[in-house]
Image: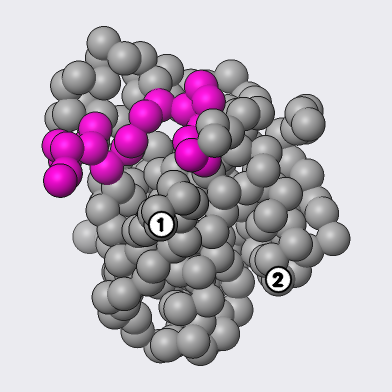
Amino acid sequence: MLYLSFEQIFENMKLINLGQSDSLLNTFVAQMRDKQIQKDSMRFRTNLHRLGQIFAYEISKTLTFTPTDVQTPLGTANVNLYDSKIVIATILRAGLPLHEGILSYFDDAENAFIAAYRKYDAAEKFHVNTEYCTCPDLRGKVLILADTMLATGSSLILGLERLIADGGDPAYIHLVCPIASTYAVDALQKALPKDSTLWTAAIDEELTSHSYIVPGLGDAGDLAYGSKL
């Protein structure tokens, strides 16, 4: 399945793929995918941080704004400033640089963190465990949930359910996932409420038998912070 338009509205969620518009964003994604460049973990984290800033800027255009007077040394300037209450959430650990990039633009936002990981059984099938979660009150606020990779969508859906269970229903949900699979996009279409948008930079067609995205970029957590046991 190919997603050919820059923005699509499904029955429930809206999908916006920024990678389908020519911009500097595609350079950062290409560097993250490149198996030689991605050996530099600092460059990998920096590019995730940059993507977070780009997504934050685009999301800011969807918020509510109020005319505000700002006093300068010489007079008064009238500026439209956003008045939405923002909560930025991420799934540990791969989403941290992306989270920091978004937070560097929404510097007054509240923050939430959730630990989710794959646990494999004897048959090499996995289910997602969600354990640690810290979350402010989400009611009436705009929730931005960031995660680097969206393979099956299971971690994101379970993480979102946990956040809402702990913090209440947000007014709107933005999901930021730079690399997604068509499988996960289809899953999110069915799982997300109407007041939600999935933002991505690339949608890949294939998943391996272990549910890794192809061509993807590998394990984002390991590339950002080193391999784990």
Marks 2/1 in contact by CB < 8 Å: the verdict is no
Query: In the rendering, at what x and y percent does residue 101 appear?
Result: 31, 47
Locate residue 167 relative to residue 15 in the image: left or right.
Answer: left
Q: Is residue 69 above or below residue 211?
A: below
- Mark 1, Cα crowd under 10 Å, few <14 / some 14-19 / many 20+, is few
**Amino acid type, residue under disc 1 in the picture:** Asp
Between 60 and 16, the one nearer to me in the picture: 16
Residue at image x 65%, y 28%? 205
Instruction: Provide the residue span drawn in magenta.
Output: 210-229
Q: Which mark is residue 193?
A: 2
Residue located beneath label 1 in the image: 121
List the single residue furthest toward the front. 122
Q: Is residue 135 above or below residue 160?
A: below
Mark 2 vs mark 1: in front: 1
Q: How many numbered marks have been drawn onto this rendered protein structure?
A: 2
Residue 169 part of the magenta-drawn span: no
The way the protein has been coloured in the rendering is one colour
- Mark 2, Cα crowd under 10 Å, few <14 / some 14-19 / many 20+, is some
